[in-house]
Image (cartoon, helix red, strand yellow):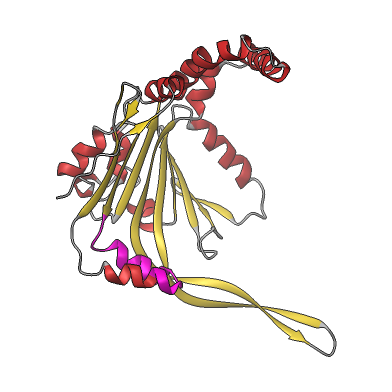
């Protein structure tokens, strides 16, 4: 295969923050929710507290030593918030340990609204129609030790009767989602929150895909990743992208990639000498 090393150089203070943010391990329990037949997935992992502390250590002195009033005011406000807020608790809630998968296209019934306009009366009539089309199947997952808070919000939302939401077993179903108005689902499994429009995931794989989850080289690369890792199936993705786009230039591009095989990987590795690889 072809390997390309892309090095990014940056300011010493900024790279120090980035390095501190990369000092974290990806929670491998999330990998069990990435199926072996996925067409693409990406992982993001960051030590938010470490990055914040490094940022404070690097940039607060710059503000304090400045003679600009706006910098001095920024330092005062930042220091006040720093005293009032428990940063560790905040970053425990808003974890940056997450993944997203693209699992191909699936035919679904969609809904669209059309308008019949009467040029004489200047009135219009709204009409809703259903049609079948292919929809991208995607799953987003995040690990947080405070997942129980999400469960509390779900229970509160469920108490409202007009939001098109119902609880089915261990997951919640929302009637209208952001992709063509098709349903989407949310599940809270231990410390993992799953958001997906994949009904089969909710019905059959809430404990993970087991032996059908990613394995081999992709699993090892994902587990060892620092900060960011992505893997894409370059045989299937161009076909799906061509189906989804209506732009002719983009369709021509994806057509030119037809019959290609192999996977593409993107990985963000460590920082040395203010250089990121």
Relative image position of residue 108 (x, y in whole percent): 44, 70
108 shown above or below 1: below
Q: Nearer the viewer, residue 172 or 181?
A: 181
Name the quadrant of the C terminus: top left
- Residue 4, quarter of the rendered image: top left
139 shown above or below 71: below
231 relative position to 132: left or right: left
Q: Answer whether residue 107 is visible to the viewer in this image.
A: no
Q: Nearer the viewer, residue 111 or 62?
A: 62
- Give the residue at x 28% y 53%: 232
Q: What residue occupies the far right of the structure in this picture?
A: 121
Relative image position of residue 75 (x, y in whole percent): 65, 14
145 shown above or below 235: above
Q: Answer whether residue 181 is visible to the viewer in this image.
A: yes
- Give the residue at x 56% y 60%: 176
- Residue 190, quarter of the rendered image: top left
Q: Nearer the viewer, residue 60 or 115?
A: 60
Q: What residue occupies the far bottom of the structure in this picture?
A: 120
- Give the residue at x 60% y 57%: 164
Q: What residue occupies the far front of the structure in this picture?
A: 67
Q: Nearer the viewer, residue 204 or 277?
A: 277
Relative image position of residue 33 (x, y in whole percent): 31, 44
- Residue 198, quarter of the rendered image: bottom left
Tell me where the magenta segment starts and ends, as one range. 233-250
């Amino acid at each position: 295969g072809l390997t390309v090393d892309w090095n990014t150089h940056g300011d010493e203070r900024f790279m120090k923050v980035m390095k501190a943010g990369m000092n974290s391990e990806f929670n491998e329990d999330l990998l069990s929710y990435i199926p072996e037949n996925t067409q693409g997935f990406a992982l993001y992992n960051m030590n938010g507290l470490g990055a914040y502390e490094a940022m404070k250590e690097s940039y607060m002195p710059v503000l304090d030593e400045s003679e600009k009033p706006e910098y001095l005011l920024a330092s005062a406000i930042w220091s006040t918030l720093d005293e009032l807020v428990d940063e560790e608790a905040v970053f425990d809630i808003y974890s940056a340990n997450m993944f997203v998968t693209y699992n191909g296209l699936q035919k679904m019934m969609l809904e669209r609204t059309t308008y019949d306009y009467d040029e004489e009366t200047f009135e219009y009539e709204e009409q809703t129609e259903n049609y079948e089309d292919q929809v991208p199947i995607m799953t987003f997952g995040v690990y947080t030790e405070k997942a129980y808070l999400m469960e509390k919000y779900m229970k509160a939302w469920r108490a409202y009767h007009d939001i098109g939401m119902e609880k089915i077993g261990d997951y919640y179903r929302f009637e209208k989602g952001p992709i063509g108005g098709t349903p989407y689902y949310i599940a809270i499994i231990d410390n993992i929150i799953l958001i997906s429009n994949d009904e089969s995931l909710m019905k059959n794989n809430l404990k993970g895909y087991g032996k059908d989850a990613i394995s081999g080289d992709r699993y090892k690369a994902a587990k060892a990743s620092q900060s960011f890792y992505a893997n894409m199936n370059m045989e299937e993705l161009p076909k799906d992208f061509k189906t989804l786009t209506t732009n002719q230039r983009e369709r021509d591009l994806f057509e030119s990639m037809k019959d290609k095989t192999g996977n593409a990987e993107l990985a963000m590795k460590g920082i040395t000498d203010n250089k990121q690889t």
